[in-house]
Image (tube, rainbow, N blue to C red):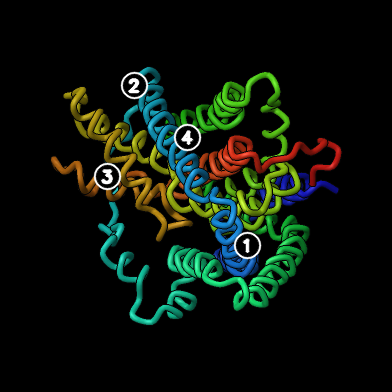
Amino acid sequence: MKVWLKLLIGSLLGLILGFVIPQDNLAVLSVIDWLSRLAIQIGRYSLVPTLAFSLVIAIYELRQDKEMWPLVFRTIGIIAVSTMFIIGSGMLVTLLFPPARIPILIEGQKESLSLDIGEGILQLLPSNMLAGLVGDSSFLLPIWVFAIFLGAGFSYDRVYTKPVISLVDSLSRIFYYIAIFFSEILGIFMIFLGAFWAVRFQTALKAQVFRDIIVLLAVYGVLLCFVILPLFLYLLGGKRSNPWKQLYGALGPAIAGFFSGDLNFTLPLLIRHAKENHGVQRRSNALSLVLFSTFARAGSGMVAAISIIVIIKSYSSLGISAGDLFSILLFSGIISVLLPRHPGNGAYIALAVLCGWYGKGFEAGYLILKPIAFYLVAIGTMIDVMVASLGTYAVGVLSGFQQDRETRHFI
């Protein structure tokens, strides 16, 4: 059975389970919460060794072929263009089809949510280089930095480094097959994620005041992921490109991203789909996926930008000036690049930071959307995953590191 179908069936079974569970049974809800956290950890389990060893080899091979910087610049270019387009288009749709105002009836205690950029920079280059390998399991950028330096160091003297290169290459392939095992059984654990998602969704629907923003994000999120982004892929690749084929090849990670809301959870799936569905070679997909998953959080930025517009209109009838809209676009884009420490709640963190930056009495405005924070994160993560998947394919095509795969051989 195809991986995406296993994930879909597991998610649907979880949704059914979540909708039939009594909402007042706290013991059962606690168990589902625990099982969903277990599922996230299992999904992440094989990520670091799989991608870290692949990244080391990718950096070494790209440097040998003098292709590393061209590939990096292509990836950065796609990240920059997609970020501005996705956030800008989301804001435009919100202005054209404004959701109903959300009554300011929801009280909540202000939380300490920040990007903590200074601490993140300190973790990137710790006093002990090896300390980056045993840090926060959510913040993987220090590990990627270590892998990049190690891969670059392999070019020092091939006489000395050849045995180590062979070892790392073997480890990369071994852990890749371990990741295959986990991706094959992940459908079972999607039941827990789907059930926990359904439980929270029922609670959000009961409030009724969130229905407009829920519908807006759902409709535009689907339109963006499954129509607009594939069209851009078609324009990029010309008539030779079949964007719907690549879209089909990205369904698995999209489903996992939506129900988990966690980018690190979907990364092992992205690695496998990039190779076996999109046909992108390891030397390209390892580096591209690291860059996309770390800095291409346009979906989370877009959700934050849409949300703050709704919050401002809910608080005030004065409207939003063109200058404010431009500032929201600019700062949402900047914040989206600064979310590598938050793979699991990026959209909500981005919204909290955006509210704090905007000021004018809206610093705690994000609290009115706290009941649907999981939904904001789900939509943002799904878009982030699609950008990473289709963007990795585009970089592979532009760099000459992609080979077409027949649809019947897709996983």
Which x, y percent locates residue 287? 55, 53
Decide: few, some or many residues near mark 3? Use Cα within 10 Å; few <14, some 14-19, many ≥20.
Answer: many
Q: Tell me if 34 is positioned left or right of 368 in this view.
A: right
Mark toward the start of the polypeptide (2 vs 4): 2
Residue 145 position in % (x across, y down): 45, 65
- Which residue is labeled 3 in the image? 354
Q: Residue at x 30, y 46 (%)?
A: 366
Q: Earlier in the sequence, mark 1 or mark 2?
A: 1
- Marks 3, 1: nearer the viewer: 1
Q: Which residue is mark 4?
A: 214
Q: CA distance from mark 4 to mark 3?
A: 20 Å
Residue beneath disc 2? 95
Query: Mark 2, residues whose alpha carbon is within 10 Å: few (<14), some, or many (≥20)?
Result: some
Q: CA distance from mark 1 to mark 2?
A: 43 Å
Q: Amino acid at mark 1?
A: Ser
Identify the mark nearer the N-term, 3 or 2: 2
351 left or right, relative to 26? left
Numbered label attached to residue 14: none
Per the model, the C-alpha gap separating discs 2 and 4 is 15 Å
Q: Quadrant of residue 28?
A: bottom right
